[in-house]
Image (tube, rainbow, N blue to C red):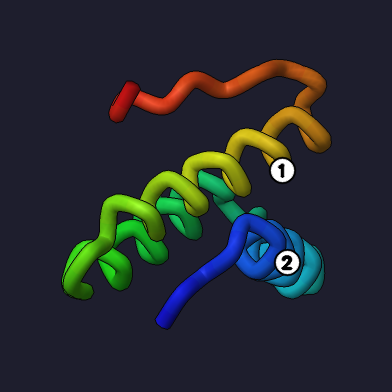
Amino acid sequence: MTGSVELYVNQFKSYIMNGLISSVPPSLGAAYEQLKEEIGSQDGCNHELKNLDQAYELVHKEISGRTWVSSRK
């Protein structure tokens, strides 16, 4: 699977939107960790993780107005 930044942005946004009808508010960090675990089990995952980090940063900034810095940098 080759996940583009746009694919991961859409996955994060879907996770958030689906969580709005839940009694427990969604955690963007939980979605990030879940996707990170799924990617980590694949071969050649560095590019995937970079795309995931970029998508998380975009969505995080859009929601909170603050820039997120990956711990991988």
Marker disc for residue 31: none
Marker disc for residue 59: 1
Q: Tell me which corner region of the image, top left, top right, bottom left or bottom right, holds residue 35.
A: bottom left
Residue 26 picture location, percent across and down: 62, 56
Determine whether the residue tagged by mark 2 lies in a helix, strand or loop.
helix
For disc 2, the marked residue is 10
Q: Does residue 20 appear left or right of residue 7 in this picture?
A: right
Q: Earlier in the sequence, mark 1 or mark 2?
A: 2
Q: Is residue 22 above or below residue 33?
A: below
Q: For mark 1, does the 10 Å Cα neighbourhood hold few (<14), some (14 to 19), or many (20 or more) residues? A: some
Q: For mark 2, does the 10 Å Cα neighbourhood hold few (<14), some (14 to 19), or many (20 or more) residues? A: some
Q: Does residue 12 appear left or right of residue 65 in this picture?
A: left
Residue 18 picture location, percent across and down: 74, 74
Q: Residue at x 43, y 45 (%)?
A: 50
Q: Residue at x 77, y 27 (%)?
A: 64
The amino acid type found where label 1 is placed reads Val
Residue 1 picture location, percent across and down: 41, 82
Q: Is residue 59 above or below residue 20?
A: above
Which of the image's four quarters has the C terminus? top left
Q: Tell me which corner region of the image, top left, top right, bottom left or bottom right, holds residue 59.
A: top right
Q: Residue at x 49, y 59 (%)?
A: 31
